[in-house]
């Protein structure tokens, strides 16, 4: 019965991964992710001082 308990979680993870893959393929999403990563890195460097 262990498999029945994990099935909903696995199905939800699969659906989420498929939807995330659609977003990742868009140019604007990748640019926004890059900008956010640079901002977070800058904030981390400044916060260290």
Image: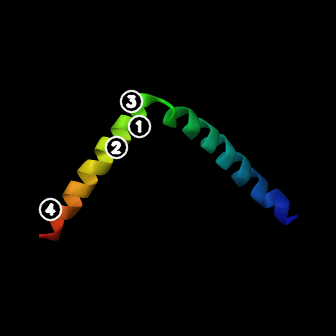
Q: Is residue 49 above or below residue 8?
A: below
Sequence-earlier tag: 4 or 1? 1
- Looking at the picture, tell me which residue is in the foreground, 1 or 19: 19
Q: Is there a contact, CB below 8 Å, between mark 1 and mark 3?
A: yes
Mark 1 is surrounded, within 10 Å at the Cα level, by few (under 14), some (14 to 19) or many (20 or more) other residues, namely few
Mark count: 4
Q: Is residue 14 above or below residue 47?
A: above
Task: Name the secondary structure under disc 2.
Answer: helix
Sequence-earlier tag: 4 or 2? 2
Task: Name the secondary structure under disc 1.
Answer: helix
Q: CA distance from mark 3 to mark 2?
A: 10 Å
The residue under label 4 is: 46
Q: CA distance from mark 4 to mark 2?
A: 18 Å
Mark 4 is surrounded, within 10 Å at the Cα level, by few (under 14), some (14 to 19) or many (20 or more) other residues, namely few
Sequence-earlier tag: 3 or 2? 3
Q: Is there a contact, CB below 8 Å, between mark 1 and mark 2?
A: yes
Q: CA distance from mark 3 to mark 4?
A: 27 Å
Per the rendering, the mark at residue 28 is 3
- The answer to whether 35 appears left or right of 45 in the picture is right
Q: Position of residue 47 (x, y in %)?
A: 16, 65
The residue under label 1 is: 30
The residue under label 2 is: 34
Task: Name the secondary structure under disc 3.
Answer: helix
Q: Is there a contact, CB below 8 Å, between mark 4 and mark 1?
A: no
């Amino acid at each position: 019965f262990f498999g029945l308990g994990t099935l909903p979680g696995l199905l939800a993870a699969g659906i989420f991964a498929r939807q995330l893959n659609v977003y990742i393929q868009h140019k604007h999403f990748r640019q926004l992710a890059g900008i956010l990563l640079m901002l977070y890195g800058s904030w981390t460097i400044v916060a260290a001082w």
